[in-house]
Amino acid sequence: MNLSIVIPTLNRSKNLKELLLSINSALRYEPDLKNKISLETIVIDQSEDEKTRNICKEFSVKFFKSEKKGLSLSRNIGLDKSLFEFLIFFDDDVILKENYFKELLLMFEKYKNFDSFTGKILTLEKNKPYSRLQNNLPKWLDIHSFDQVLSSGTGFSSSYIDEIGKFDERFGLGSLYGGSEEGDIILRGLNNKKRIFYNPDLISYHPEEKGEFKFSLSRFKRGFSYGKGRGALMKKHQESLKLIITIKNFLNPILGFLYNLLKLNLNLSSENLGSFFGRINGYFLFKK
């Protein structure tokens, strides 16, 4: 099995080192895993110092510097540099479960002819789902379940990218529409009858979003940026998305706002509120 891992990173050298350590650990989970997987790890660095470069030398991974910033931009650079038939994208602040590559091989043996796949993200601190949209049931995704795909831990065949195209660089962190780049590339695939599989046994861990008893302007702004991406996504794909899906995507942050308000997680409710207004802004701002 030939596999490329692409990791965009920005000023998170310590987190990146933990991810790279977890990749090495997962490859050693069983003695023969390294013989079954040909792996290249590609790091696209947008940092302002040389710490990431030095860590990449330590781990002998492929390192590329990008002076321009943007998550989708960096992922597309990784796509261009990849040599292998399957690619997985990870955020720089996750770590892999030790049996990740074992489960990946089992998936390739059991489920045939998929074009893309995604795994489950748990919180590092509590081992609970990072997103309420992800459950323990493996399934083939469709237009109603595309949002089970999170930004990190999603893989594509090279043929998927050749046919569907790369990430839309108007979406994602550092871009005009600050999120939903993964939703866009998944929806484009589903609209072209690509087979996309959700595998809850492919587990990675992400730091928990902790609630605090204070409103946060920075969290509101972050929510607005992410929401702007989701609103633009709804507009871009309005012809293929049913009205109920669009309505649900606008209601979700309101429900999240009320839930976190009742739980006194005021910082998280600030982000939910920002997400709602961002979705409205992105929907009306987006032009194809």
Image (cartoon, rainbow, N blue to C red):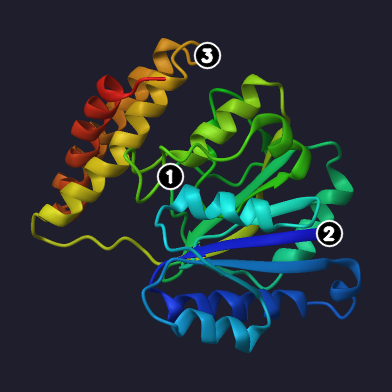
Q: Is residue 201 visible?
A: no
Q: Residues within 10 Å of mark 1 (few under 14, many from 20)?
A: few
Provide the secondary structure element on which disc 3 rests.
loop
Distance CA(mark 3)–CA(mark 1): 24 Å
Question: Which numbered disc covers residue 111?
Answer: none
Q: Which residue appears at 16% of the width and 48% of the height?
A: 220
- Residue type at mark 3 is Ser
Residue 197 lies, in percent from the top left, at 69, 39
- For label 1, the residue is 132
Indicate which disc, 3 or 1, sits on the residue closer to the N terminus.
Answer: 1
Q: Is residue 279 above or below residue 84?
A: above
Provide the secondary structure element on which disc 1 rests.
loop
Q: Which residue appears at 17% of the width and 39% of the height?
A: 273
Residue 203 lies, in percent from the top left, at 61, 60
Q: Are marks 3 and 2 in contact (CB under 8 Å)?
A: no
Residue 254 lies, in percent from the top left, at 22, 32
86 horizontally vs 236: left or right: right
Indicate which disc, 3 or 2, sits on the residue closer to the N terminus.
Answer: 2
Question: Which numbered disc covers residue 2?
Answer: 2
66 horizontally vs 247: left or right: right
Provide the secondary structure element on which disc 2 rests.
strand
Query: The C terminus appears in which quarter of the rendering?
Result: top left
Q: Is residue 187 above or below residue 211?
A: above
Q: Which residue appears at 45% of the width and 52% of the height?
A: 71
- For label 3, the residue is 240
Q: Is residue 43 visible?
A: yes
Indicate which disc, 2 or 1, sits on the residue closer to the N terminus.
Answer: 2
Q: Is residue 57 above or below residue 99?
A: below
